[in-house]
Amino acid sequence: MTEKKVYLNGEYLPLSEAKISVLDRGFLFGDGVYEVIPAYSGRLFCLEAHLQRLSNSLNAIRLSVPFDTAQWLDILQPLLIEGDAQYIYLQITRGVAGKRDHAFPEQCEATVFAMCSAIAPFEHQQGVKAITLDDVRWQLCNIKATTLLGNILLRQQAIDSGCVEAILIKDGYATEGAASNVFAVIDNVLVTPPLSNEILPGITRDVIIDLAQTNGLSLREQAISLETLQSASEIWLTSSTREILPVITLDNKPVGNGQVGEVWQTMQQFFQDYKRVVS
Ligand SMILES: Cc1ncc(COP(=O)(O)O)c(C=O)c1O
């Protein structure tokens, strides 16, 4: 099997030949941002929205946006591999500095890295288990930063408890999952926490909001207290690589009747149809 090619600073290289310096600030400090862009049937899904979020993340950490949409497309398209569902992982760090120092270096060229991987089929039609955990992360969760230690520790704690995801609670309210956004069906209304610095503005979240509005489903962007979450008839977790995961057990208690809900089934159909239309 030929080794997969990745993109690093203007070159396409076999994965094993792509190397960065130990002085790269991404390695030393997690000083960088990233994107995960799914592709279906060889077409990047919601590319503009992902690139807009990337620009927002870069601006937030005071890095300039290195390429426009057409240039990104030229860089990313050749990475796409055979298969129905893939994703591009794209990372930009502040680059290699002369020495390790927290302050920004005066001269530094950003490191740009991208690779493509298959989206592993994730068995979720029967629903998944989640736990609630304290949201111990920082206050800039709207930036898609590579500095992910908080998210990693929380996800691992969920897995150690036999769950697929942690739903994070801050000051008594749900923020998001360790690597996903959260939706709940409350009194037949689809509810998701509003955008703020406490959550990542998920692209899947946006697609679901649009699909709900286009198809006449009641939807509210509103804070969800832990008690409300516990009494929800459905809970979903959304992300680019796992799409819409129905949660059937929260903290070892059934969500609703403990089965995948009807609203999820409806939205799942809308989402799959939408993917086909835009791919
Ligand atoms: C913390 C966090 N929130 C939300 C999401 C969902 O974002 P998207 O739908 O753009 O993948 C992710 C995705 O990985 C994430 O890491």
Image: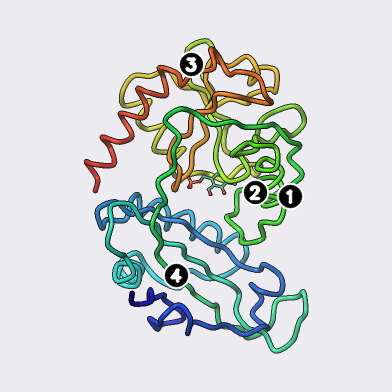
Residue designated by label 1: 138
Q: Counting residues from the N terminus, which is met first, the one under dot 3 or under dot 4? A: 4
Callout 3 environment at 10 Å: few (<14), some (14 to 19), or many (20+)? some
In the rendering, at what x and y percent does residue 115 appear? 43, 68
Residue designated by label 3: 189
Q: Counting residues from the N terminus, which is met first, the one under dot 2 or under dot 4? A: 4
Q: Residue at x 55, y 78 (%)?
A: 110
Q: Residue at x 47, y 12 (%)?
A: 188
In the rendering, at what x and y percent does residue 250 appear? 64, 25
Quarter-wise, where is residue 29 in the image? bottom right
Q: Ligand 1 closer than 8 Å to the CB at disc 2?
A: yes
Q: Ligand 1 closer than 8 Å to the CB at disc 4?
A: no
Q: Amino acid under label 3?
A: Val
Residue designated by label 4: 114
- Whether tag 3 and tag 2 are in contact, CB under 8 A, the answer is no
Residue designated by label 2: 141
Q: Residue at x 38, y 53 (%)?
A: 38
Callout 4 environment at 10 Å: few (<14), some (14 to 19), or many (20+)? many
